[in-house]
Image (cartoon, rainbow, N blue to C red):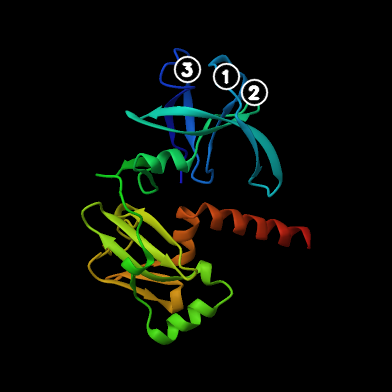
Amino acid sequence: MGMIHVTVSLRAGEKSRKRYEADFLVDTGATDSMAPANGLEKAGIKRRGRMAYELADGTTVEYDFGLVEIEFMGELTSGRVIFGPDACEPLLGVTALESVGILVDPTNRSLKRLPAVPLKVLRVSDVEVALPRNELAEALAAENRADLLVGGLMDHSSEMVTLLRGNMETLAGPFSAFPTSGDGIVPDFDDFAVTDCGQSVRFGEYEAASDAILDEYSPEYRQRRLNERRAAERTR
């Protein structure tokens, strides 16, 4: 997926006249947002704490963070911002995006605004289990159950797919994440099934691999696979 940038404005609070505004890179692998420390300090944003963060290469670094109002795409939210290196590229994390009902659409490399932000948390019991009983038992007992899908829920009003992993965690993505295939097969979201013992899902005649879906919508999965590849390279 190509890079997505959006103009973001940060300020210490509602009454603050100073702000930090820049073109932020949308980073679905980051939980919190980050901006150059010198820019945040000039905007009057204060350090409120310190946390350890894991970088893409698996190393752990401690950063100071502040609490700010975050404004972008006509939306306003609040959260933590990391005081990054002075020369770092500003990053907009998934917490800010999801808090205002905005998701990344990988098909057209844009941000997708949901019609409404869900007020209640989706329960596991709301999601339909789609694997046959014998395959479900095998998937739930597998060591890699977090990498398998066992069920899903299609919401046509918001055009969102919610999928249930074998570890009973859910992940969501827009219908547009499943574009018409190269041979012209269009996904039928009224005909959903999980196949291959949780390794793929089917929407009518349209199929998608579970690992490809997780790689796009689960930052934890991407980070874990990256760490595994690097560990394997070090042992060669």
Residue displayed at 44% across by 60% down: 213
Q: Is residue 208 above or below residue 98?
A: below
Task: Specify the amino acid type for callout 3.
Answer: Arg
Q: Is residue 184 visible?
A: no
Circle nearer the N terminus (1, 3): 3
Residue on which the image places disc 3: 19
Q: In which quarter of the image is residue 226?
A: bottom right
Q: What is the three-letter code of the residue carrying label 1?
A: Gly
**Image side of residue 144 versus residue 174, left or right:** right
Q: Mark 1 points at which residue?
A: 39
Disc number lying in front (2 or 3) = 3
- Residue 154 picture location, percent across and down: 27, 62
Q: Is mark 3 on a helix, strand or loop?
A: loop
Q: Tell me the SS state at disc 1.
A: helix
Alpha-carbon distance for marks 2 and 1?
8 Å
In this picture, residue 106 sits left or right of residue 205: right
Label 1 near label 2: C-beta < 8 Å? Answer: yes
